[in-house]
Image (cartoon, rainbow, N blue to C red):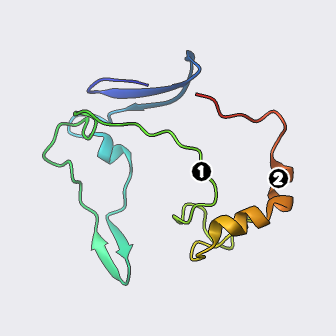
């Protein structure tokens, strides 16, 4: 990962394999605008305005200060990233036993994983 006040670039294995490059949109537009966040969002039963928490910061906020980068590989999450009833997800976000539901469905999903898979740092 490399960055300065105008761009960020992420690599896999070497600098020859750039997989993501983020640049500012222009004068006065930072990474928040690049995210394309909606103007409002549902919070429970209420519609709330989504405001830029970095409005009074530099354009490269929040990356204008020290930060930690977390790299994770996870399955069975209940964050809503993979919606219920779409595809063949073997658990439901509201389930109190989502991890167990995922494990019990191994005969279904393990067939989709290739033999040459790996996750190395």
The quadrant of the rendering that contains the N terminus is top left
Q: Nearer the viewer, residue 26 or 86?
A: 86
Which sits earlier in the primary sequence, circle 1 or circle 2?
A: 1
Dot 2: what SS? Answer: helix
Residue 77 in percent (x, y) is at: 58, 61
Residue 35 in percent (x, y) is at: 38, 48
Residue 2 in percent (x, y) is at: 39, 22
Residue 115 in percent (x, y) is at: 84, 37
Q: In the figure, 61 relative to 53: above or below?
A: above
Label total for image: 2
Residue drawn where x is 78% and y is 66% of the image? 104
Residue drawn where x is 57% and y is 77% of the image? 94
Left or right position of 93 against 54? right
Q: In the figure, 2 relative to 41: above or below?
A: above
Residue corresponding to mark 2:
110
Residue corresponding to mark 1:
74
Q: Nearer the viewer, residue 39 or 104?
A: 104
* Residue 108 seen in the figure: yes
**CB within 8 Å, label 1 to label 2:** no
Left or right position of 106 against 70? right
* Residue 89 seen in the figure: no
Label 2 Cα crowd, 10 Å radius (few <14 / some 14-19 / many 20+): few
Label 1 Cα crowd, 10 Å radius (few <14 / some 14-19 / many 20+): few
Q: In the figure, 29 relative to 43: above or below?
A: above
Dot 1: what SS? Answer: loop
Q: Nearer the viewer, residue 57 or 36?
A: 57
Residue drawn where x is 29% and y is 73% of the image? 48
């Amino acid at each position: 990962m490399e960055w300065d006040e105008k761009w960020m670039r992420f690599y896999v294995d070497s600098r020859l394999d750039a997989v993501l490059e983020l640049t500012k949109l222009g004068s006065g537009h930072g990474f928040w605008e690049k995210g394309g966040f909606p103007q409002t969002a549902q919070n429970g039963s209420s519609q709330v305005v989504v405001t830029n928490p970095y409005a009074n910061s530099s354009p490269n906020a929040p990356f204008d200060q020290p930060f930690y980068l977390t790299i994770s590989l996870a399955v069975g999450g209940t964050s809503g990233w993979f919606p219920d009833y779409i595809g063949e997800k073997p658990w439901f976000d509201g389930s109190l036993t989502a991890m167990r539901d995922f494990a019990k469905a191994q005969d279904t999903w393990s067939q989709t994983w290739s033999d040459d898979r790996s996750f190395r740092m």
